[in-house]
Image (cartoon, helix red, strand yellow):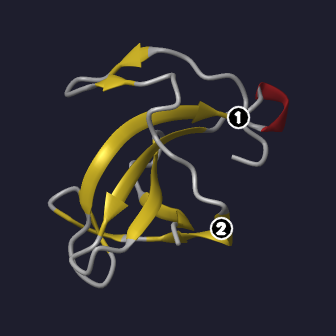
Amino acid sequence: PEQAGPLEHCHTADTTVSTDAEVAQPLWLLPKPAPLQQRDGQPVWNGPMAILRGPQRLRGNWWQGEQQRDYYLASDCHGGRYWLFRDARTRRWFVQGIFA
């Protein structure tokens, strides 16, 4: 996000990727994205995470190495809100930020 490139509209097999500001961004970002475990393709961190909104695709600039991330607003079973992304290339989940 700190080096975000242009947003692009695209379609995936199961959903439309948003290019507008539908996915809120937290003020507190982790110094480095934290990898999440997966269970049946869904993110898990201290229990299963529920996707509330998203995806929103952010792309890196070509001269910095191609990078595509789909960002989501998610919550845990205790009501905590998180800003997650799924790397479009590796399909791995990460936590990028935490909402207050």
Separation of residues labelled 1 and 2 (CA atoms):
21 Å
Tell me which amino acid carries mark 1: Gly
> Residue at the bottom extreme?
46
Question: Residue beneath label 2, please?
Answer: 28
Residue 95 in the image, given as x and y percentages of width and height: 49, 65
Q: Residue 60: which numbered mark, if any?
A: 1
Q: Secondary structure at mark 1?
A: loop
Q: Quadrant of residue 26?
A: bottom right
Q: Residue 94: which numbered mark, if any?
A: none
Q: Residue at x 21, y 77 (%)?
A: 77
Between residues 75 and 93, which one lies in front from this camera angle?
Answer: 75
66 displayed left or right of 54: right
39 displayed left or right of 28: left
Q: Secondary structure at mark 2?
A: strand
- 74 lies above or below 79: above
Tell me which amino acid carries mark 2: Trp
Crowd tier of the residue under label 2, counting other residues whose Cα lies within 10 Å: few below 14, some 14–19, many 20 or above: few
Q: Residue at x 42, y 16 (%)?
A: 10
72 displayed left or right of 97: left
Residue 79 in the image, given as x and y percentages of width and height: 28, 74
34 displayed left or right of 75: right
Residue 69 in the image, given as x and y percentages of width and height: 53, 41
Between residues 65 and 98, which one lies in front from this camera angle?
Answer: 98
Residue 35 in the image, given as x and y percentages of width and height: 48, 70
Q: Residue at x 39, y 37 (%)?
A: 55
Q: Residue at x 65, y 67 (%)?
A: 28
Crowd tier of the residue under label 1, counting other residues whose Cα lies within 10 Å: few below 14, some 14–19, many 20 or above: some
> Residue at the right extreme?
63
